[in-house]
């Protein structure tokens, strides 16, 4: 035959080429970029998770994420209140740059957000659960959200613009809908799902399954439960978020016995509050387990990044408080767990300072999407894959604005303030009706009980921190901070 194949040989070659090209096309039709499941709760403190050393509850399914992935120990919010934190996460920008300084501000969804950028890059995107940003979600192929704070039981939801009455418990409904959406997705595309729970936000209403948890327990009180704020600025006392004085009957599910007073009454209120809070957390933990089990069952886990966080921390009786807002550690610190099989080392821990404005760039980076130049965070992908933290930030900047209407205090009366936190120190400047500074040496005083701002031995530290504060305000282009002199 020489160089000729003959008719039969030619047919075999052509058939082989068709089969090869067909299989190559089919492989190309399936986008191999990682899926992203971002689970966020509302007001879940890291110290109410056993993987973060909780003394008061167990969270086995969240612990599973930590065991199978990476736990971050120093992740902080940049404005410790619900809507502003969510806007920071979506945009990768500080509050003054994204326009949501407090819960009254309307979020402009037309500005770049990581879900919309992922969608434009070929991801399917969905938002299910608590949105809390006043405007409708933009940048999602599908969205179904609670109006405002939403209800725990039989909530109403707004699904693609239409109000729908739902039956059941909010945490279960969000998980059910998340699983249903994943099941019905277009299989050839990667997906990004925001699964955002209402729990454990006030008024802490547990479901029937967990209603009797801790019924016979006495939950340990935090070490700072009876803090007297002796060395602190007036702002620490001026607030309206104490266990002792500010919990309502709707929070404690009834009024206390008439014969209780003093420390016994305060403990009664704490026990009623903290048990319902932990019951709501238990439901979240169970539902995180359900979602993880579904990803495993559908063989999606290996190529899916699962992130768990909360929109900020929360006071669990620490300093005698509930709620958040202050730059003190319990409210500033966010839980942050990441599972990414084959990329993230199981059981690993990172201690670098990370903020919620880093999340957007991180999600874009792992998907291979260029972040807009006006985003203000840093991708933590190098930390996730175990690289050394070359030139990583040594300090983070915080700014809290909300002080009610016309300066009257509004919700919880926490004074506006801003500050800087390094590995060892924290400097806070309270403004708006009070001009006062606090400095904490976190190595010597991890519970932040002793304000050493006026201590002569810390004069050099104060000067250096004020310089760093000014640098960060300039870096993030915060336009209206007071003089740091």
Image (tube, helix red, strand yellow):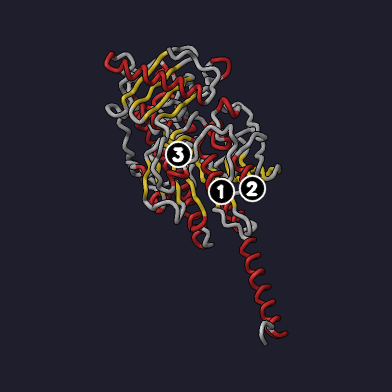
Cβ–Cβ under 8 Å for marks 2 and 1: yes
Of mark 3 and mark 2, the one earlier in the sequence is 3
- Mark carried by residue 289: none
Residue 223 in the image, given as x and y percentages of width and height: 30, 31
Mark 2 packing: few (<14 Cα in 10 Å), some, or many (20+)? some
Of mark 3 and mark 1, the one earlier in the sequence is 3
Residue 370 in the image, given as x and y percentages of width and height: 59, 42
Task: Name the residue located 61 percent from the left edge and 38 percent from the top edge.
Answer: 113
The image shows a total of numbered marks equal to 3
Gap between marks 3 and 2 measured at Cα: 32 Å
- From this view, report whether residue 142 is shown above or below residue 256: below
Q: Can residue 85 be seen from the camera position used here?
A: yes
In which quadrant of the rendered image does the C terminus lie? top left
Write down the residue under mark 2: 121
Residue 286 in the image, given as x and y percentages of width and height: 46, 51
- Mark carried by residue 44: 3
Q: Tell us which disc is closer to us: 3 or 2.
A: 2
Q: Residue furthest front?
A: 2
The reply, left or right, for residue 471 in relation to residue 271 is right
Looking at the picture, tell me which residue is in the foreground, 265 or 458: 458
Cβ–Cβ under 8 Å for marks 3 and 1: no
- Mark carried by residue 367: 1
Mark 1 packing: few (<14 Cα in 10 Å), some, or many (20+)? many
Looking at the picture, tell me which residue is in the foreground, 230 or 267: 230
Task: Name the residue located 51 percent from the left edge and 56 percent from the top edge.
Answer: 303
Q: Secondary structure at mark 2?
A: loop
Q: Can residue 201 be seen from the camera position used here?
A: no
Task: Name the residue located 39 percent from the left edge and 53 percent from the top edge.
Answer: 346
Q: Residue furthest bottom?
A: 1
Of mark 2 and mark 1, the one earlier in the sequence is 2
- From this view, report whether residue 142 is shown above or below residue 263: below
Gap between marks 2 and 1 measured at Cα: 9 Å
């Amino acid at each position: 035959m020489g160089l000729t194949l003959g008719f039969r040989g030619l047919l075999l070659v052509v058939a082989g080429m068709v089969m090869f090209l067909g299989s190559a096309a089919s492989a190309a039709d399936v986008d191999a970029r990682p899926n992203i499941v971002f689970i966020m709760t509302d007001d879940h403190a890291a110290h109410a998770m056993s993987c973060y050393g909780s003394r008061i509850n167990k969270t086995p399914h969240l612990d599973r994420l930590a065991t199978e992935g990476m736990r971050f120990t120093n992740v902080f919010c940049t404005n410790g209140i619900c809507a502003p934190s969510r806007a920071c996460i979506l945009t990768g920008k500080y509050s003054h740059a994204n326009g949501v300084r407090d819960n009254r501000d309307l979020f402009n969804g037309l500005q770049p957000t990581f879900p919309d950028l992922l969608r434009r890059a070929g991801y399917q995107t969905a938002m299910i659960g608590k949105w809390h940003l006043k405007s409708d979600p933009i940048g999602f192929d599908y969205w179904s959200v609670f109006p405002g704070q939403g209800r725990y039981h039989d909530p109403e939801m707004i699904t693609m613009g239409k109000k729908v009455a739902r039956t059941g418990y909010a945490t279960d409904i969000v998980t059910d809908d998340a699983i249903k959406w994943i099941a019905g997705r277009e299989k050839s595309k990667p997906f990004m799902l925001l699964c955002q729970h209402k729990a454990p936000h006030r008024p802490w209403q547990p479901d029937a399954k967990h209603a009797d948890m801790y019924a016979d327990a006495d939950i340990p009180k935090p070490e700072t439960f009876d803090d007297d704020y002796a060395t602190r600025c007036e702002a620490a006392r001026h607030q309206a978020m104490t266990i002792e004085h500010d919990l309502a009957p709707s929070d404690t599910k009834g009024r206390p016995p008439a014969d209780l007073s003093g420390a016994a009454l305060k403990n009664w209120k704490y026990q009623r509050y903290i048990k319902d809070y932990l019951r709501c957390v238990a439901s979240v933990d169970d539902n995180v387990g359900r979602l993880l089990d579904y990803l495993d069952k559908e063989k999606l886990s290996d190529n899916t990044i699962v992130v768990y966080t909360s929109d900020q921390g929360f006071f669990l009786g620490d300093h005698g408080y509930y709620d958040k807002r202050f730059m003190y550690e319990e409210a500033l610190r966010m839980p942050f767990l990441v599972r990414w099989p084959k990329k993230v080392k199981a059981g690993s821990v990172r201690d670098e300072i990370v903020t919620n404005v880093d999340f957007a760039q991180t999600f874009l980076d792992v998907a291979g999407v260029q972040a807009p130049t006006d985003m203000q965070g840093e991708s933590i992908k190098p930390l996730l894959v175990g690289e050394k933290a070359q030139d990583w930030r040594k300090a983070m900047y915080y700014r809290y604005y909300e002080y009610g209407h016309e300066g009257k205090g509004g919700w919880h009366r926490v004074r506006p303030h801003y500050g800087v936190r390094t590995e060892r120190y924290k400097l806070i400047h309270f403004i708006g009706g009070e001009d006062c500074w606090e400095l904490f040496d976190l190595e010597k005083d991890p519970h932040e009980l002793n304000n050493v701002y006026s201590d002569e031995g810390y004069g050099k530290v104060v000067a250096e921190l004020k310089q760093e504060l000014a640098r960060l305000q300039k870096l993030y282009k915060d336009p209206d901070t007071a003089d740091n002199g």
